[in-house]
Image (cartoon, rainbow, N blue to C red):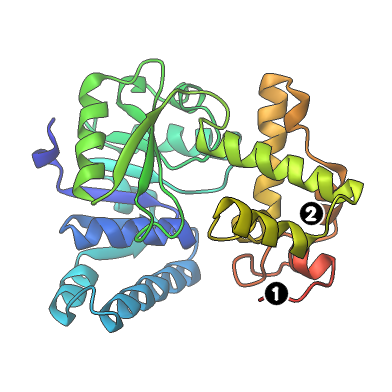
């Protein structure tokens, strides 16, 4: 198979990240289905995609005709076979949980055509391990987008131990077609980007625990001193503190490196329901700013 043979793309999971991937694929003209677990979430994801396209229209980045063509290419469903039964590529963007992912890959392995490529948008879970749940490890690859997916340029591509050159080349070309900058990283817990940022955030949380500086002070110093667009606590709240906790725990378990052991403060906050910025994490009590009662900018 070559990229020109790809007509149908299925996105498994259409939350904030998944809906962005759906939008990207549909805008390129692919027949794009997405799968969610309920009719309510299918409706909510469809509305999120239309709202994102509306913002792009308002900014002049897309025409009304392009919006209409994109929407016409999208179909949401809660039925696995309906969504993925004729997919040439499946891009997974579900919960960052190895068991959940592997259970889903087993089901898709039986449903999808033999030529279908499986691409995981995981930010940390090893590709080789996920691929072991299927009978097509040569067609399995990591395709790590960054949030918001329609805007962020970077895509991290991760080959599993048995990923074929054909699979890699198709995904590489697809990434370029998406107007992204694809960069390869080796398979391992956290790959590069997630391992780097989770290590950094963990160390900064430990400095907060020690009283080196406060939440707002650390964010300000990192933004102005290192030219980050946002401070590490703002970023952590945006990513999700539960997500960061699970990533750190996974990398620590896999590597044994104490630098990745989740800080006690992070564990306490997640246990108490402080899961990140309320706008990013529905039902959350808030993130670092709310926990420490610091006003946001």
Residue at screen point 74% across, 68% down:
286
Q: Is residue 51 left or right of residue 237?
A: left
- Residue 110: where, in percent of width, then height? 35, 33
- Residue 268: where, in percent of width, then height? 87, 51
Q: Quadrant of the C terminus?
A: bottom right
Q: Secondary structure at mark 1?
A: loop
Asked if disc 1 and disc 2 are in contact, CB closer than 8 Å, the reply is no
Q: Nearer the viewer, residue 231 or 1?
A: 231
Residue 17 appears in the figure: yes
Q: Nearer the viewer, residue 29 or 116?
A: 29
Return the residue at label 2. 270
Say which label, 1 or 2, has the lower sequence index. 2
Residue 97 appears in the figure: no
Q: Secondary structure at mark 2?
A: helix
Is residue 227 shown above or below 63? above
Return the residue at label 1. 296
Residue at screen point 75% across, 40% down:
203
């Amino acid at each position: 198979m070559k990229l020109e043979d790809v007509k149908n793309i299925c996105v498994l999971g259409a939350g904030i990240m998944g809906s962005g991937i759906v939008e990207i694929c549909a805008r390129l003209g692919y027949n794009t289905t997405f799968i969610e677990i309920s009719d309510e979430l299918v409706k909510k994801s469809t509305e999120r995609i239309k709202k994102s396209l509306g913002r792009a229209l308002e900014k002049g980045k897309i025409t009304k005709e392009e919006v209409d063509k994109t929407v016409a290419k999208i179909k949401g469903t809660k039925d696995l076979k309906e969504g993925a039964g004729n997919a040439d590529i499946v891009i997974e963007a579900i919960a960052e949980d190895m068991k959940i992912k592997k259970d889903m890959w087993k089901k898709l392995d039986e449903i999808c055509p033999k030529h279908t490529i499986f691409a995981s948008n995981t930010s940390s879970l090893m590709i080789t391990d996920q691929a072991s749940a299927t009978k097509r490890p040569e067609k399995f690859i990591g395709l790590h987008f960054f949030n918001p997916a329609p805007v962020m340029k970077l895509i991290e591509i991760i080959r599993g131990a048995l990923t074929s050159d054909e699979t890699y080349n198709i995904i590489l070309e697809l990434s370029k077609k998406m107007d992204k900058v694809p960069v390869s990283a080796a398979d391992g817990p956290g790959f590069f980007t997630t391992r780097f940022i989770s290590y950094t955030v963990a160390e900064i949380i430990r400095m907060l625990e020690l009283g080196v500086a406060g939440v707002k002070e650390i964010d300000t110093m990192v933004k102005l001193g290192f030219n980050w667009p946002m401070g590490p606590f703002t970023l952590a709240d945006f990513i999700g503190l539960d997500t960061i906790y699970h990533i750190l725990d996974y990398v620590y378990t896999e590597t044994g490196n104490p630098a990745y052991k989740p800080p006690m403060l992070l564990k306490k906050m997640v246990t108490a329901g402080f899961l990140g910025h309320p706008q990013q994490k529905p039902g959350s009590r808030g993130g670092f700013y709310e926990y420490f009662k610091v006003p946001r900018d």
